Image (cartoon, rainbow, N blue to C red):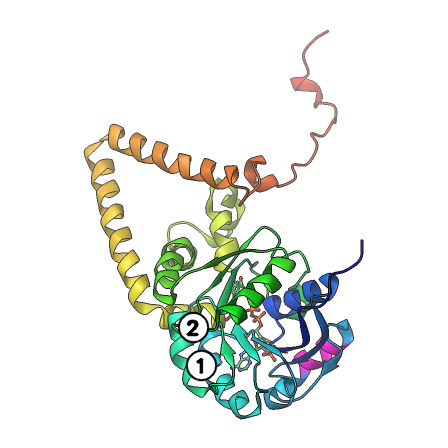
Amino acid sequence: MSKPTPLFNRLALIGVGLIGSSIARAARAQGAVRSIVATARSPATRKRVAELGLADQVVESNAAAVEGADIVIVCVPVGACGAVAKEIGPHLAAGVTVSDVGSVKGSIIRDMGPHLPKTAHFVPAHPVAGTEYSGPDAGFAELFVNRWCILTPPAGADPKAVDKLAAFWRLLGANVETMTADHHDLVLAITSHLPHLIAYTIVGTADELQTVTRSEVLKFSAGGFRDFTRIAASDPTMWRDVFLANKDAVLEMLGRFTEDVAALTKAIRKGDGETLFEHFERTRAIRKGIVEIGQDSPAPDFGRPHPDLAHEPLPKPYAAED
Ligand code: NAP
């Protein structure tokens, strides 16, 4: 099948980690742009991006990357986006679309907006897709397929620029939804930020136990613990920035969560099995709903492979008589 006409001429990617490199791979695979110019903070990452052939050009500075670009996507940790906007602002071409992929949106609008010229279309975005891995090697072209990308255009954003960015994300396989930055930050506080905080907490708690050894925690982790460790292995810089940037919404959700933990604590103390059962029944329905709308696989145990049973003969004393 022939590829569609590119949506943009020159894509500038600032930051080429998991998300930036996945955008590069997917944009190229789909013919979404004519050329890609990329840059990253460290010489080591820039070298790796060149080795992987992720961009047509790898340049040394953010300012050089955006020269002549008609779309710029900033793919760095949330806390670094303001400084990047300040650096690129004076070098942006008129009519360029400037976007990002940050996991928090209110702070991005606050930190980046003031540094961008009026001639640029600023359309913040958040692809709700990821893994616990980082860096340019971690990305893959299919990362966004059937995942949601949320656009949070500020008041007064040009609808044509918003539509074009939505078309770009759809071409990369994502479903697109538009909402305000404040609403985004509230929704993601419960669906992403709080789960990460809980995972970081529980894994840390287990690590500090005196009565249960670390080797026991690792050995018996299949009881549930290991599913938290995947999330708790996520990038420390990224997540530090997320909690600092989405402070209010996270504290709001954390307050509600703490109340619910207290209610379950009381049910356990009182031996109130009915309350526990009703709660667990309700939460099981949520999992079913996620699978039904195609946001996770129905395979048991997240589809982990299970080794075959060994067919070794039983030692003599235990074998049944013929
Ligand atoms: P990553 O793999 O760690 O890559 C981050 C990139 O940003 C690297 O190229 C890094 O350059 C550069 N960078 C780091 N600190 C910087 C700074 N202070 N100034 C300029 N550049 C800097 O991160 P990622 O997972 O792609 O995340 C990037 C953005 O996507 C974050 O805003 C995050 O909130 C958002 N996001 C992440 C996920 C996820 O699951 N990971 C999902 C959705 C959205 P060097 O390698 O040279 O340091």
| Residue 279 % position (x, y) | 31, 35
Asked whether residue 282 appears in the rendered view, the answer is yes
- Whether residue 188 is in magenta: the answer is no
- Look at the image and give the residue range highlighted in magenta: 44-50
| Residue 89 % position (x, y) | 51, 89
- Give the residue displayed 61% in from the left and 40% down from the top: 303
186 sits left or right of 84 in the view: left
Q: Earlier in the sequence, mark 1 or mark 2?
A: 1
Q: Which mark is residue 125?
A: none
Q: Which residue is mark 2?
A: 241
Question: For the view shown, which residue lies furthest in the right direction?
Answer: 1
Q: In the image, what residue type sits under mark 1? A: Met
Give the camera-side residue of 187 and 9.
9
Main SS, magenta region, reads: helix
Q: Which residue is mark 1?
A: 112
Q: In the image, what residue type sits under mark 2? A: Asp
